[in-house]
Structures are given as C-alpha cells and as structure tokens.
Amino acid sequence: MKHLLLATSLVALAASAASAETIRTTSSFGPNHVLATDGYPVLFEKLSEFTDGRWTGIDTPSGLLAPNEMNTGLRDGVSDMGPIIMPYFAADYVESGLVAEMSMLGSDNRAISSAVTEYIATCAQCVAEFAANGQVFLGNDSTTNYQFLSSVEINSLEDLQGLRIRTAGSVFTRFVEGMGAEPVQMPSSELFEALSSGVIDATYSSVGDLKNAQLYDVVSSVTLVDKGVFNAAAMTNVSQILWSRMSTEDRDALAHASQFAQAIGVYSWRDTAVEAEAVAREAGITFITPDAEFIAKGDEIRDAHMASVVATLTERGVTDAATKVARYEALLIKWEGLVEEVTSAEELAELRYQTIWADVDFASYGN
C-alpha cells in the first residue's frame, strides 16, 4: 500500500511539472553573471512555490538577446523576461529615468535599489512608459558605490588632470569632467583590454568590477571616491504578452518571486566588493583615501548636480520634476531606515514585497 501511495504521489508530481507553464527568461549578461547563476534560478524556485507548481522558468544567459536589444525583444515576445538597462533606451524612459539622475545620492545599495523600485512601481507615468514598450516593471537592482580603479595612482586633483576615465552614464561623465579628467564611454567587457593597452587610465566603477571584469592584473590602485551608484537596471522586466496570460494571483506571485532575484543581485554587489578588495590587497593593489581638496571638489560637484537636477529633468520632459525629485529623496530616506536591520537577501526580498507590492492591484498594474 505504501509503495502504491508513493507511486501515485510521484505520478502526480510529474504530471504537475509537465503541466507547468514556463517563463522564457534571457538574463543576457552571460552564464557566469549572478542573474544567470543565482538570480533567475531562485526566481523560478520561488515562483513555482508561490503558484503551487503552475509556473516555472528556463533561462538563456546569452546569445538570444543582447542587453541593448532587450527593449524590443520583450515588446515582441522574443523573451518573456529580461533586464532593461534604462540609459540604453533613454528616449523611451524619460519619467523612469529620473532615478538615474539621482544616483549620486545614498550609499547603501539595498536602500537605493528599493527606493528606485518603489518610486517607479508607484509612478503612474513610469508604469505607462514600460507599458508603451510592451513591458511590465517588477523591480530594480543597484551597484555599490563607485571608485576610481586605475593603472596609475590618484591621490589628488592634480593626479586626475587629463586622465582618460571610463564612465557609465551621463551623471558620471559630468562628475569626471568636473574633476578634471576626460570621460570615455565603453562597455564593461572592454575594460581589461583598454586598461592594459593604455586606452584608458581608469574606470569609475564598483570595487566589485575588479572581480567581475578580472581587472586585478591591470589595476594598480583604487581611489576611494564613494559617490554614485548605477541604479537604473530593471532586472526582471516582463513582456506584456506573458503578463496578459497570467491570472491576477500569478502576477502577484511573479512580482513576489522577482524580489528574490533582485535582492540576490543587490547582495552580490556587496559580497563581491568585499571579496574583490581582499583579493586586490593580497595582490598588492593599493587603496587610497584622496586628499581633502579632492574630497571637497567631489562634494561640490555632487551638490551642484543636485541643485540643477530639477532643471535638467524638466528640460528632458519630466513633468513636475521638483515634486518627483522630493518624492524620490523621501523614499530613499525611508528605505535607509527600513534596511538597517536587514541581514540577508531573503529578508530584503520579503521586505520589498510586503512594503511595495503586497497591496498592488495586479488586475490593472502594468496593463
């Protein structure tokens, strides 16, 4: 009898797995990226748990859609889910792109990513921008603070003058220019070759990129700037083609599961930065606290940027920019308090779900 019951249970489980709907994700950054190794797999596990096995997923980590192809790829249903790097498609995300202009604020990427997520998810114009591109926004990631990772020592403003420094986005381009260096735009995949060949002298990046881009052999020093993060990465955007097939309950489950993928990404940046610094110090890479003049100049540029951000956003077409900037600033302060006692990615994921998503009307959200 026991054998019969076990056999019946196994058949039921197999039938459930066979009948589960499958989300086709494209993590897009390659098989070794944390989204492919941990983020999406945990999302699939949680989604199956939250839907009693009705939904699962399978990821294509590279080859199907590149990050700069994801906007139309999700719209057209080439993939069901993937990361949207908003600055790649700035003209399509004018309202949502406000968050990138605020990226010089804050130092805790748990709070920053959560504030961005709540800002966009509760901004009707932002949600409408994603809908216009055939997508549904389900949350955001954020790096840790940026530093100068360089092949030369940077101790002072004088050391910076004329250096060619790779930047990721217009905010950081203006910051590097203001500090007296020459910004250079290039993808992170080219950093090793560019530093080793002298095409650039430094990159303005998270310390974690020492590991992510394997820069240990071409970086000799890290200058601690601690200003700015990349906070405009929507890592689990969903095609509306998929969304339209999901029940209200299953949409809720997907939003819930998505928070785990994003929280893993957030903690990966933190853990990788710690690991990369330890390896770098062991390899003889020096970590430099710049002089007082350098720090004061950086503060001055950041403050000037924030003083002009409303005018910049208004010029780009953001409506009522002053109110929206103030709302984002308030959300960041709120989340800095909320994450103080958080100790794991799992705790962060549940906090984000309960605070941002639990009361969302998924019958209408994203439509």
Image (cartoon, rainbow, N blue to C red):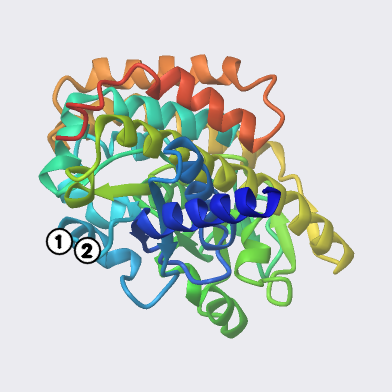
Would residue 167 appear left or right of 75 to someone viewing this image?
Answer: right
Q: Which residue has dot 1 on it?
A: 76
Q: Image quarter for residue 139?
A: top left
219 to 11, vertically: above or below? below
Q: Position of residue 277 (x, y in %)?
A: 77, 55
Q: Position of residue 238 (x, y in %)?
A: 28, 48
Q: Which residue has dot 2 on it?
A: 73
The residue that appears at 54% across and 32% down in the rendered structure is 349
Would residue 256 appear left or right of 348 to someone viewing this image?
Answer: left
Q: Position of residue 258 (x, y in %)?
A: 44, 41
Q: Position of residue 36 (x, y in %)?
A: 52, 62
352 to 345, vertically: above or below? above
76 to 317, vertically: above or below? below
The residue that appears at 38% across and 35% down in the rendered structure is 255
Say which amino acid is labelled 2: Gly
- Disc 1 to disc 2: CB gap under 8 Å: yes
The residue that appears at 69% across and 34% down in the rendered structure is 344
Residue 106 visible to the viewer: no
The residue that appears at 73% across and 71% down in the rendered structure is 216
Residue placed furthest toward the right: 282
Mark 1 and mark 2: span between their CA atoms? 5 Å
Q: Secondary structure at mark 2?
A: helix
Q: Quadrant of the C terminus?
A: top left
Q: Secondary structure at mark 1?
A: loop
Would residue 67 appear left or right of 207 to someone viewing this image?
Answer: left
Q: Counting other residues with Cα less than 10 Å from the Cα at mark 2, is it few (<14), some (14-19), or many (20 or more)?
A: many
Between 192 and 85, the one lying in front of the other is 85
Between 300 and 264, the one lying in front of the other is 264
Q: Counting other residues with Cα less than 10 Å from the Cα at mark 1, is it few (<14), some (14-19), or many (20 or more)?
A: some
